[in-house]
Amino acid sequence: MIFNTYWFFIALLPFLLIYWAVPSSIGRMVTLLIFCAIFHTHFAGAAGVKPIIVLALISYGCALSRNKHLIALAITVCVLALCFYKYLFFISDELIGALNPELGKSFKLIFSSVLPAAPPLAISFFTFEFVHYLYEVRKGGEPIKNPLHFALFSVFFPSLVAGPIKRYTQFIPSLEEAVKKINWRMVTLGLVLVCVGFFKKLCLADNLTSCTEYFANKFELITLEERWLYLVALSFRIYLDFSGYSDIAIGLARMMGITLPTNFNWPYLALNIRDFWHRWHISLSTWIRDYVYIPLGGNRHGMLRTAFNGAFAFALCGLWHGAHWNYIAWGLYHGIGISLCLAYPKMLGSFGIKIQTFLAKYWFIKWFMTYLFVVFGWLLFFFPLPEAMEKFQLLFTTGSEL
Amino acid sequence: MKTNLQTLKDWTREHLEAKFVMLGVIVGFSLCVALGHYFASKNLYANFHRLHPYISMDTQFLPTFSNLYELVKSKIEPGKTLVIVGGDSVFNGQGQTVDKLWSDQLQRDLGDKYSVINISFRGGRVFEGAYWIFEALSKEKHDVIFVANAFGAVIGIPCGNTPYRYMYWDGYYKGFLRDFQARKDFIDINPDLLKDQFDKPLDELFLCMQLDKYLRFRDLWNVVSYRLFASIWTDGTSKDFLRPRILYEDRIPVSDTGKARDSDQSIWLNTVRKYSLPYFQNVNGKLVPNHQGWREFDLLGDCAVIPELRPNTLVVSVGICPFYYNMLSPQEQERHNLMISRSVSGYDKNGYKTLVIDKLATDDFIDGVHLSPAGGNKVASQVAAKIREIKEKQQNQSQQ
């Protein structure tokens, strides 16, 4: 996490003081842009900022041209850049390597010579934001003309590293309003949110991380009750970690007067899996819905196609979290979960309707089933498939023997 | 149209509320800083015997430089020689319960003219942690002797090794440490010392320590963790992790010597072998010194401790358990003996006082190197004799 580094703390304070003290809108935007550039260069390194600069220039230029072919080309470039930096090793190791290990090794060697050791900082986030922007402009949306606005949309430091994934139609008006006059009420609210975020992250999530990592290694040795407790701790670990980070990002933006989209809304209170995705990592799930699921046809082409679209969108959602099979499995698991949740009343006929009516009466059962579904899913998210399966089985087995 | 009252209410809501909150944040923050500075100048520990696992790195409780400095200062008494004990788990008393701690026996052996404080760490090196406190205290011209055990030919780097390097930089940035050109030069020509084990620069550590110089958040947090509640989960504290560390007892058990020998034999044999370097076998089968290794040893010995403090620095080489020594091949035994004699002569050459304790029995150990209470008592009496000898010589010299 970048926000809990001393560098960030030391750099942020003078920046905010200058930002608040600067009297003009342009001055504030320039100050913000300079800080964003310093922030990104510090954490990504000089070489690490090149991809964002190149992709931002391409996106800005192509969108301004309003040429649909050029915009489609820019979208392709963004997607390819993401695949290139993040998924090339996955392709060589897991796809080519699975078919032909020797060939996989050869490809890996070739890729190693062209790829940096780690993907550029925040590439998953800024490419998604550029794709959203280009897609909306291609659909007829107004492009961002002011280069300063576009630069800030591209490198806005609070949301750059871990979201929320911004929408330019919301961000630009908020930015324009924010730089006109400092809203101290918003600054205060932002500060409170930042504190809440740090508390969630440092005091709760980090402790749960140490605890769950320790017990993960001796999962077969702990009691059945402790295993279930571990699963609950795992679910709160990821929630508090990620939502804490989002709170800090949203709070920091608010301290500058800028509103970022909400990312979490009490996800573990969801009453079905669809509801969960309306509450969990909202900026990503709506992005996937708007730019993958709906363009694929959504639910407009029959049940089979809807199921395929949903599964594909969620597999992609899983893959976005990391280039490993377990993330894909986690995405598919949720895709299947949503499909079943939506389709069971039709599939099971009158029995399905009865279940639906029963569950509508007893919300507690719905909530419990949803939570259980989600926490089982976290095993897939955190562990390679065989280990996740083993841990899942151990949840229903006393002792260490499977 | 808005009334004046409404406008005032709006203004209050917009500005005053927010400003009060901001003012509260600033006042609260300043108060925390002031408290941090206040507590940094006070002794944190109550009923202290040693840095046991609940008040040390083992459970993520990182004593600050000020914590240890004030602790040691609290032991200074007029007319008494202060003995600071440093080193690793052997001198920390691993294998001895707190009521059978060797350094408490050392205090009894030395008598009323001396005041002993044991601030050695598990996994610490001979000139880490406790030595820096000794160096910081030397600014005030107290009568102090520093005693630490050396394990094999391992000195460690002058600005600290992995878990304890934070303490060097803590003392450095807070101005506790003295200017020492040889150490500075050594760090300057070895930029890798400023990187972590993953080859990443230690910038965050430096920023933390620089910031802490002014804000003293680490001192404040240690007081909170020690007196009120701890905030970090560790497997050592587990379900009780919120419990203030002052409530934890020093519960290092006395190990069953025979059991340790049965279960960890290969581990300790490997450890002993590993620390019998740097001698290697040449083409004729003879053991010859690894010149590169010994050059480094001598260089490190020369830039770890300020020369004027070396006559008051006693390096103790405690032998290994005879049970393991006898398991070594004749060649390995020879190498081990050569290593001990060469490292001791290296310390001597650099102006340190040295003591070799090698006449210990198997039951004086709980494993390959750690001492049982009986072994601890033997070591305490020999160290006490050596300290008295050093003091007597110094007194004779000053009289002449």
Image (cartoon, coloured by chain):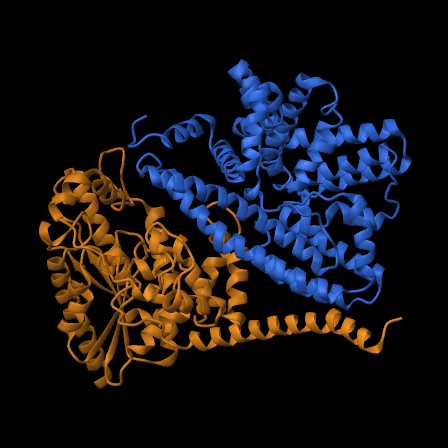
Q: Which residue shows up at 47% across the image and 26% down it?
A: A385
Q: Measured along the vertical axis of the image, is residue A338 above or below residue A2?
A: above
Query: Front-most of B34 and B208?
Result: B34
Q: Which residue shows up at 71% across the image and 40% down it?
A: A126
Q: Which residue shows up at 45% across the image and 58% down it?
A: B186
Q: How many marks?
A: 0
**Quadrant (top left/top right/bottom left/bottom right) for the C terminus of chain A:** top left
Q: Measured along the vertical axis of the image, is residue A51 above or below residue B164?
A: above
Residue B142 relative to residue A391: left or right:
left
Residue B269 relative to residue A392: left or right:
left
Residue B238 in sight in this render: yes
Question: On the image, which quarter does residue A5 sit in?
Answer: bottom right
Q: Measured along the vertical axis of the image, is residue A39 above or below residue B313?
A: above
Residue A151 pos. (x, y %): 79, 47
Query: Front-most of B303 and B240?
Result: B240
Looking at the image, the residue that sits furthest to the top is A100
Residue B181 in sight in this render: no
Question: On the image, which quarter does residue A166 sit in?
Answer: top right
- Tell me the shade of chain A: blue
Q: Which residue shows up at 53% across the image and 54% down it?
A: A200
Residue B199 relative to residue B150: left or right:
right
Residue B137 pos. (x, y %): 36, 75
Residue B239 pos. (x, y %): 34, 52
Which chain shows up in orange? B
Residue A251 relative to residue A360: left or right:
right
Query: Front-most of B346 and B320?
Result: B320
Residue B287 pos. (x, y %): 23, 41
Query: Front-most of A106 and B99?
Result: B99
Q: Measured along the vertical axis of the image, is residue A123 above or below residue B23?
A: above
